[in-house]
Image (cartoon, rainbow, N blue to C red):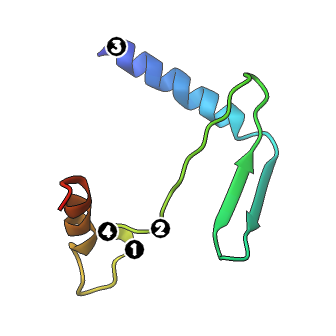
Amino acid sequence: MLRFTGAALVAASLAGSALAGDVTHFTLDNGLEAVVIEDHRAPVVVHMVWYRAGSADEVPGKSGVAHFLEHLMFKGT
C-alpha cells in the first residue's frame, strides 16, 4: 500500500509540472474542442479522448441513462 501511495504522489507531482508548459486550446469547425499540452521531457506522444457525457451531464429526471448506456456498450448488446 505504501508503494502505491508513493507512486501516486510522484505521478501527481509529475503531472503538475507537465501542465506548467504551453497549453494550446482550439475548436475545430465540427465543434470538437482540442487541447494540446507540449512536454518535451520524453520522446513519446500520448493521445486521450474525453467525452462530456456521463452522470454529471444528465438533465434532471433522466438520471441513470449514461450508466445504462455504458453497460450496453461494454457488454456488446
Q: How would you rate the neighbour count of disc 2 (Cα within 10 Å): few for under 14, some for 14-19, many for 20 or more?
A: few
Write down the residue under mark 3: 2
Q: Quadrant of residue 57?
A: bottom left
Q: How far apart are the alpha carbons under marks 1 and 3?
A: 35 Å
Q: How would you rate the neighbour count of disc 4 (Cα within 10 Å): few for under 14, some for 14-19, many for 20 or more?
A: few
Q: How far apart are the alpha carbons under marks 3 and 4?
A: 32 Å
Looking at the rendered structure, the secondary structure element under dot 1 is helix
Q: Do the CB atoms of the residues marked 2 and 1 lie less than 8 Å apart? A: yes
Q: How far apart are the alpha carbons under marks 2 and 4?
A: 10 Å
Looking at the rendered structure, the secondary structure element under dot 2 is loop
- Which is more foreground, mark 1 or mark 3? 1
Q: Quadrant of residue 44?
A: top right
Write down the residue under mark 2: 52
**Of callouts 3 and 4, the N-terminal one:** 3
Residue closest to the eye, 16 or 57: 57
Write down the residue under mark 1: 57
Q: Position of residue 74 (x, y in %)?
A: 24, 53
Q: In the rendered image, which quarter contains the C terminus?
A: bottom left
Residue closest to the eye, 32 or 56: 32
Q: How far apart are the alpha carbons under marks 2 and 3?
A: 34 Å
Q: Position of residue 3 (x, y in %)?
A: 37, 12
Q: Do the CB atoms of the residues marked 1 and 3 lie less than 8 Å apart? A: no
Amino acid carrying label 2: it is Arg
Write down the residue under mark 4: 55
Horizontal side, residue 1 vs residue 30: left or right: left
Q: How far apart are the alpha carbons under marks 1 and 4?
A: 5 Å
Amino acid carrying label 3: it is Leu
Q: Do the CB atoms of the residues marked 1 and 4 lie less than 8 Å apart? A: yes
